[in-house]
Image (cartoon, rainbow, N blue to C red):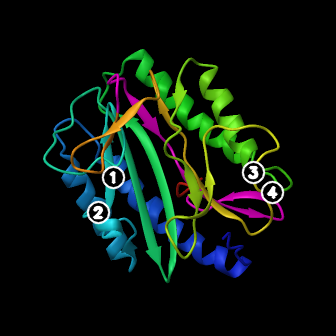
C-alpha cells in the first residue's frame, strides 16, 4: 500500500534528511587512505545521535551499524569493520536517519585519495548523473517506470549496467515502503507519480556485468565478475512544484 504524505509530514522527513546529509558530509570529509570503514561508521553514528536522531539502519533486520560501506566490487550492504581504505578504492556510503518517526535514506560514492582510474572516475560520475536524471523524470503525471527507463538508458549509453535485483523504494514512517522504484523499466509503466509520493531513488551501477551474489555474511552484495560498482541515492518528495530532494547536501 502506498502512503501519500502531507506537506507537514514531508517537512518532518526533510528534517530527518538534513541530519542525514550532515552525517554523510562528516563521513565524506574523513574518507582517506589508511582510514577504516568502522571508524567512518562511528563518525556517522555520532553525528546522527548528537542531533537527537536515531541511526535508521542500526537494528534494521539485525543490521548492527549506522552505515553500509561498500568497497570496489561490493555493490551495496557492505558491513563496516577493520578494512583499511587504500588510495584508489571506490567507496560507497549508504545511511539512514529516523527522526520523530520519519525516515530518510541517502548514499554517495567517492574514490579514495588521488589515484583514480579513468574508468572508476567515469563510473562514479555516470552513476551520480543517473540519479539526478531519475529525479528529473519523477514528474507529476509520469510513472515510476519512467524513472527506471531514464536511469537505465543513461547508464547503458556509457557501457555500464544497472543492478536489477535491488531497487529504490517508497519511504516515510518505514525505511522501505511501497512502491518499488527499479533502475530499469519502460516508459508509461508503473504507478502514476503524484503529489505527496515520497521515494528513495538509488541507481546501483556496475562497471561490468550486473550479475551479483550475496556474501556468506548474508548482507554484502558483490559483482560476480569483480568489476567495481557505484551507488548514489536521495530521498525525494513530489510536491506541487515537482520533485524536492529531502536529503540534499547542506549548502546546496
Residue 243's spot in the image, x, y percent?
73, 56
Residue 207's spot in the image, x, y percent?
45, 23
Relative height, residue 2 to residue 79 (above, below): below
Mark 4: give few (<14), some (14-19) or many (20+) Cα within 10 Å: some
Q: CA distance from mark 3 to mark 1?
A: 29 Å
Could you say which disc has been placed on residue 68 in the image? 1
Relative height, residue 149 to residue 107 (above, below): above
Could you say which disc has been placed on residue 190 in the image? 3
- Residue stretch in magenta: 223-247
Helix, strand or loop at label 1? It is strand
Q: CA distance from mark 3 to mark 4?
A: 7 Å
Q: CA distance from mark 2 to mark 1?
A: 9 Å
Q: Nearer the viewer, mark 1 or mark 4?
A: 4
Q: Is residue 244 magenta?
A: yes
Residue 106's spot in the image, x, y percent?
49, 55
| Left or right relative to 245: residue 195 | right
* Residue occupied by mark 4: 192
Q: Quadrant of residue 140?
A: bottom right
Mark 1 and mark 4 in contact? Answer it, CB < 8 Å: no
Q: Is residue 249 magenta?
A: no
Q: Nearer the viewer, mark 3 or mark 1?
A: 3
**Which mark sits nearer the N-terminus, 2 or 1?**
2
Mark 3 and mark 4 in contact? Answer it, CB < 8 Å: no
Q: CA distance from mark 4 to mark 2?
A: 33 Å
Amino acid at each position: 500500500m502506498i502512503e501519500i504524505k502531507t506537506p507537514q509530514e514531508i517537512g518532518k522527513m526533510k528534517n530527518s534528511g538534513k541530519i542525514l546529509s550532515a552525517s554523510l558530509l562528516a563521513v565524506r570529509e574523513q574518507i582517506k587512505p589508511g582510514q577504516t570503514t568502522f571508524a567512518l561508521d562511528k563518525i556517522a553514528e555520532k553525528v546522527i545521535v548528537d542531533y537527537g536522531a536515531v541511526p535508521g539502519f542500526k537494528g534494521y533486520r539485525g543490521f548492527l551499524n549506522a552505515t553500509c560501506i561498500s568497497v570496489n566490487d561490493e555493490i551495496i550492504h557492505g558491513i563496516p569493520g577493520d578494512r583499511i581504505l587504500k588510495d584508489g578504492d571506490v567507496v560507497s556510503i549508504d545511511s539512514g536517519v529516523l527522526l520523530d518517526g520519519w525516515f530518510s535514506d541517502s548514499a554517495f560514492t567517492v574514490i579514495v585519495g588521488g589515484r583514480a582510474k579513468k574508468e572508476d572516475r567515469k563510473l562514479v560520475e555516470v552513476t551520480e548523473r543517473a540519479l539526478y536524471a531519475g529525479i528529473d523524470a519523477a514528474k507529476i503525471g509520469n510513472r515510476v517506470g519512467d524513472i527506471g527507463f531514464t536511469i537505465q538508458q543513461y547508464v547503458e549509453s556509457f557501457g555500464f549496467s544497472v543492478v536489477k535485483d535491488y531497487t529504490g523504494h517508497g519511504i516515510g514512517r518505514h525505511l522501505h515502503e511501497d512502491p518499488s522504484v527499479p533502475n530499469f523499466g519502460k516508459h508509461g509503466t508503473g504507478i502514476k507519480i503524484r503529489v505527496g509520493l515520497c521515494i528513495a531513488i538509488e541507481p546501483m551501477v556496475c562497471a561490468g556485468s550486473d550479475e551479483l551474489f550475496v556474501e556468506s555474511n548474508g548482507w554484502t552484495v558483490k559483482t560476480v565478475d569483480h568489476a567495481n560498482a557505484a551507488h548514489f541515492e536521495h530521498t525525494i518528495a513530489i510536491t506541487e512544484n515537482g520533485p524536492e530532494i529531502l536529503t540534499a547536501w547542506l549548502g546546496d
